[in-house]
Image (spheres, rainbow, N blue to C red):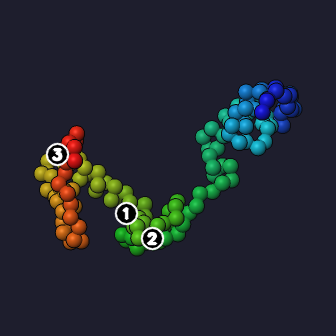
Amino acid sequence: MEFVDRLLTCADCGGEFIFTAGEQLFFFDKQFKNDPKRCKPCKSKRAGASARPGAGPAAAGISRTETRTECSECGVETTVPFKPTQGRPVLCRQCFQIKQRAHGAEVNDTALVKPVERPSMMADANQHAAATGVEIAAPVAPGTRV
């Protein structure tokens, strides 16, 4: 398919602008169905207007999904900006902040506390294999022919 520069009219300022063959190829590659409506200066102005503070989705009339639910910790009714997944705890703002602070303290104190001994992955795998009756082959060193 061959593309040729075309002259289009801007929907905002009414001025004419060139829709280059290269831009048309880009639109074709991206499978865009419509030609551009605005010249570059008007497009930049429009993009700049939406980048201003307070011009986010709420200012554009788009609202976030707010779901009413019960806090898993304290039982108070709260709203969250997402749809909760079944089986996962949902916390109110206060409980979330308390849990976040407590987790932050644990992370900061880990240098003072001896780490908890955890079984290795191989031990976990062996235990699982024994419980299910599956046999695990011994690990092979990299570069070894089997």
109 shown above or below 36: below
Q: Residue 65 at what x, y percent from top left?
A: 58, 61
Q: Residue at x 62, y 46 (%)?
A: 56
SS at badge 2: loop
Q: Are marks 3 and 1 in contact (CB under 8 Å)?
A: no
Residue matched to label 1: 95
Q: Is residue 48 left or right of residue 35?
A: left
Observer-nearest of 94 and 12: 12
Label ID, residue 111: 3
Observer-nearest of 30 and 112: 30
Spatial CA distance of label 3 from label 2 is 36 Å
Disc number lying in front (2 or 1):
2
Q: Residue 4 at what x, y percent from top left?
A: 82, 27
Q: Is residue 135 left or right of residue 98?
A: left
Label ID, residue 8: none
| Identity, as a three-letter code, of the amino acid under mark 3 | Ala
Question: Which residue appears farthest toward the front when viewing the image?
Answer: 146
Spatial CA distance of label 2 from label 1 is 19 Å
SS at badge 1: helix
Residue 142 found in image quarter: top left
Observer-nearest of 80 and 7: 7
Q: Residue at x 23, y 53 (%)?
A: 106
Image quadrant occupied by the N terminus: top right
Residue matched to label 2: 86
State which tag comes first along the sequence, 3 or 2. Answer: 2
State which tag comes first along the sequence, 2 or 1. Answer: 2
